[in-house]
Image (spheres, rainbow, N blue to C red):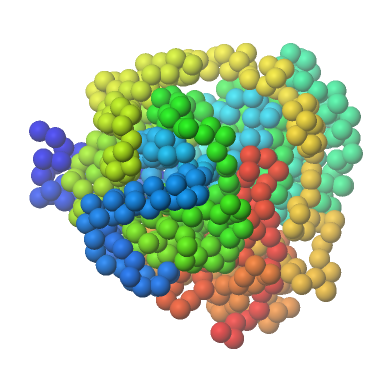
């Protein structure tokens, strides 16, 4: 009997959310309905603990506002008025429109827009890709999340994977740098807590004292976007005090002599004036790092959402190469561990089906511009697993683009999101517990299989099924569109060029649930670095070719202030604006779950007492935050959790009835220095008590 047919019992599942932990779950079913979600204690890393969001997952799956059948717009764009239609009508209308657009404007007038609302490999890198490849659609550069930092890491290391959790557990010093692990990677916390019991220390470096900062032995606040300067200051001290491992640098690195010269200029005095970190703290941090052999650096995503995000991560990644930490268990650095579990994307996504391999590529971070200014224009947009009206920068421009009458927009989602309100056709999506899918993690090293536990809710369909139907309606006859989920998973795992995947098979996944990657391969980590030199590149010729500094360098933000260029009294926008995710949502997902939204007490702006006082703002006041891109209205929280001059607003909130509460109204769509990354946090604003 399939899991769906079993009406009562406890069934294994995987958390599908874009979170590094990829927890093993247990779904408790009564009368065919999931009544409770708990952690699977058998999962080797997540061990039965899960976050409050997913403990409340039933509120999301059985939400009264879940979209249950296909809808067609009857009101104005954005108004949210729709009528029910059948899947047949929806699919044939989409296919007819696409065929016409291809005839009139070519296939590159159609743009898919997706991210990782569901991390299932089949859902976001599977049948969807086959469909848009075969269609010859325009291509999307998916730089909204970690692109700048991951690219920066690779410029230094070649390979993208870093220290894995089992090894990090051995550390005596944990530096959490621009990450908020208590909220965003909660299973790292017990690992650190266990190490602290034997004397390990936790240092948190951030622009505001987040929940993780609250737990730290030492919290270091700094000005946004200045982390590379801090890392270079640490290098200065490490070289100066002889705390570098010469033998390691000779054997494994390229450019250490140039770096030694280069960092002489980054004296603690200069670095202090850039970062706002006192000189003695820079020296203390460097000594702590240099004198603790097992020192692990957790590089968060927050610090790379900046103009200089790639260079910042590339620079921090050089630190363990100076001390030789990469050879020591419990040391090294982590940005992502996704590359260890890389599957056979060519077999899964079938780029060979594409008639136009050079199809134009646009950045998902510039959706507004793409819709408003691209020439020849985009005429059709297909959004799935993403909610750009909330998560993409420059909301004003995004909405203007979505308003275009001549744009044919389809949104496939579980909910009538802020984006779906602009759609011509909304298709209902299943939740991940209704599908078969394959999950790897970008932090731990276990692969998991999800099999459907409940039937599709309403008339919803999975991404795989939806794109299979669309392919059929378009008349695509390739076998690739008839493959089953199992066929696709087998194809994804059949990938000889990734030795870490050895032993991970469909059978093993069904049998054991949690199958670890072949981590013995990590013994060869330093021998197989795929930089051009095969070494850790402290000096990177490829960066020079790309027009960037070849040595780790502090590059000030295009928009923002470091300690050397503080705004004067006449600056129009004197405050730096940081809008990281909150504890109770997952990006914008869960923003419509009342229970979780209530825990966050509505959108807020943390402002320093000095900045509040000079503007006559008191704790709890309604304030308007604005810059040239837009404005929004939030509740002020007066607090000294950051340095004066920085304001912080956590959470990606859905638009309220008549309200303006989306932080991205203010954020820039400039691209970061590397990987086409997003620059959400490189922006400035002004704040006043709200009269609205
Ligand atoms: N609860 C929850 N968990 C999540 C998510 C969520 O929305 N909610 N989102 C998921 C996703 S998609 C991602 S990418 C990860 C992100 O999770 P993290 O890697 O933790 O990154 P962020 O939360 O974006 O930012 C972390 C911190 O970076 C800080 N920061 C901003 N600018 C700078 C800077 O210039 N220097 C330094 N040192 N710090 C800076 C922010 O203030 C914030 O405290 O979390 C995932 N997990
Ligand atoms: N200001 C600011 N903006 C940010 C960030 C920030 O820190 N600050 N963080 C950025 C980061 S790191 C990220 S990763 C992005 C995330 O941005 P998104 O990837 O857009 O994340 P979500 O807001 O969670 O939206 C995911 C959508 O997918 C839908 N979904 C879930 N499962 C499925 C499925 O199986 N099929 C289909 N069709 N739909 C599904 C969900 O219902 C939800 O509406 O946001 C970015 N935006
Ligand atoms: S969101 Fe993260 S911590 Fe919460 S259950 Fe999912 S994987 Fe685990
Ligand atoms: Mo992300």
Q: How many numbered discs, if any?
A: 0
Quadrant location, the C terminus: bottom right
User: Between 296 and 576, which is closer to the camera in this rendering?
Assistant: 576
Classify residue 81 as left or right of residue 687.
left
- In the image, farthest residue toward the front: 104
Classify residue 29 as left or right of residue 106.
left
Q: What residue is shown at x 34% (from left), y 59% (from top)?
A: 425
Q: What residue is shown at x 42% (from left), y 69% (from top)?
A: 77
Query: Residue 233: x percent and y percent?
Result: 80, 40
Query: Residue 642: x percent and y percent?
Result: 66, 60
User: Between 180 and 387, which is closer to the camera in this rendering?
Assistant: 387
Query: Residue 688: x percent and y percent?
Result: 66, 79
Residue 533, above or below 120? above
Do we see residue 167 in this rendering? yes
Query: Residue 448: x percent and y percent?
Result: 33, 31
Q: What residue is shown at x 61% (from left), y 31% (from top)?
A: 333
- In the image, farthest residue toward the bottom: 691
Classify residue 361 as left or right of residue 458.
right
User: Between 441 and 364, which is closer to the camera in this rendering?
Assistant: 364
Quadrant location, the N terminus: top left
| Res 577 → quadrant | bottom right
Classify residue 623 as left or right of residue 532.
left
Residue 10, above or below 246? below
Do we see residue 642 in this rendering? no
Q: What residue is shown at x 44% (from left), y 73% (from top)?
A: 656
Residue 360, above or below 399? above
């Amino acid at each position: 009997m399939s899991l769906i047919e079993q009406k009562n019992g406890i069934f294994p599942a995987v958390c599908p959310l874009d979170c590094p932990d990829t927890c093993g779950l247990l779904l408790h079913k009564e009368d065919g309905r999931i009544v409770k979600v708990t952690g699977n204690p058998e999962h080797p890393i997540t061990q039965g603990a899960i976050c409050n969001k997913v403990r409340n997952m039933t509120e999301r799956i059985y939400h009264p506002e879940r979209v249950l059948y296909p809808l067609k717009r009857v009101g104005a764009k954005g108004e949210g008025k729709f009528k029910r239609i059948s899947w047949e009508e929806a699919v044939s209308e989409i296919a007819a429109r696409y065929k016409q657009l291809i005839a009139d404007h070519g296939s590159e007038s159609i743009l898919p827009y997706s991210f990782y609302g569901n991390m299932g490999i089949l859902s976001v890198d599977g049948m969807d890709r086959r469909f848009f490849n075969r269609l010859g659609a325009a291509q999307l550069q998916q730089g909204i999340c970690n692109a700048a930092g991951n690219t920066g890491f690779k410029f230094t290391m070649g390979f993208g994977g870093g220290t894995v959790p089992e090894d990090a557990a051995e550390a005596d010093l944990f530096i959490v740098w621009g990450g908020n692990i208590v909220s965003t990677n909660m299973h790292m916390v017990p690992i650190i807590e266990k190490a602290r019991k034997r004397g390990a220390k936790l240092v948190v470096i951030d622009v505001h004292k987040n929940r993780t900062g609250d737990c730290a032995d030492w919290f270091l606040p700094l000005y946004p976007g200045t982390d590379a300067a801090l890392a270079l200051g640490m290098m200065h001290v490490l070289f100066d005090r002889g705390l570098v491992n010469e033998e390691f640098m000779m054997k494994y690195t390229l450019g250490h002599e140039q770096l030694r010269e280069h960092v002489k200029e980054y004296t603690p005095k200069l670095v202090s004036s850039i970062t706002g970190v006192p000189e003695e703290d820079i020296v203390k941090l460097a000594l702590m790092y240099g004198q603790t052999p097992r020192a692990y650096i957790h590089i968060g995503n927050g610090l790379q959402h900046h103009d200089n995000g790639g260079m910042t991560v590339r620079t921090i990644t050089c630190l363990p190469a100076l001390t030789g930490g990469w050879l020591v268990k419990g040391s090294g650095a982590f940005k992502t561990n996704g590359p260890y579990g890389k599957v056979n994307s060519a077999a899964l996504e079938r780029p060979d089906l594409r008639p136009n391999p050079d199809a134009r590529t646009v950045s998902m971070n510039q959706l507004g511009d793409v819709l408003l200014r691209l020439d020849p224009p985009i005429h059709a947009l297909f959004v799935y697993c993403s909610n750009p009206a909330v998560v993409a920068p420059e909301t004003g421009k995004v909405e203007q683009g979505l308003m275009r009458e001549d744009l044919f927009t389809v949104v496939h989602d579980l909910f009538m999101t802020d984006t779906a309100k602009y759609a011509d056709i909304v298709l209902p999506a299943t939740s991940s517990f209704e599908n078969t899918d394959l999950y790897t993690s970008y932090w731990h090293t276990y692969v998991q299989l999800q099999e459907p536990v409940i039937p599709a809710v309403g008339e919803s369909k999975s991404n795989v099924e939806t794109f299979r139907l669309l392919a059929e309606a378009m008349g695509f006859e390739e076998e690739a569109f008839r493959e089953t989920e199992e066929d696709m998973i087998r194809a994804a795992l059949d990938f000889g060029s990734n030795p870490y995947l050895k032993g991970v098979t469909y059978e093993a996944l069904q049998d054991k649930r949690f199958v670890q990657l072949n981590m013995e391969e990590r013994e060869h980590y330093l021998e197989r670095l795929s930089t051009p030199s095969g070494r850790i590149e402290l000096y990177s010729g490829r960066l020079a070719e790309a027009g960037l500094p070849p040595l780790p360098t502090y590059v000030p933000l295009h928009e923002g202030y470091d300690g050397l260029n503080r705004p004067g009294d006449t600056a129009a926008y004197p405050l730096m604006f940081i809008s990281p995710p909150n504890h109770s949502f997952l990006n914008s997902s869960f923003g419509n779950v009342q229970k979780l939204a209530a825990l966050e007490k509505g959108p807020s702006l943390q402002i320093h007492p000095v900045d509040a006082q000079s503007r006559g703002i008191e704790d709890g006041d309604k304030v308007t935050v604005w810059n040239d891109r837009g404005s929004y209205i939030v509740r002020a929280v007066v607090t000294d959790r950051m340095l004066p001059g920085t304001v912080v607003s956590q959470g990606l909130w859905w638009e309220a009835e008549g309200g303006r509460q989306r932080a991205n109204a203010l954020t820039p769509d400039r691209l970061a220095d590397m990987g086409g990354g997003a620059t959400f946090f490189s922006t400035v604003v002004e704040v006043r008590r709200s009269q609205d």
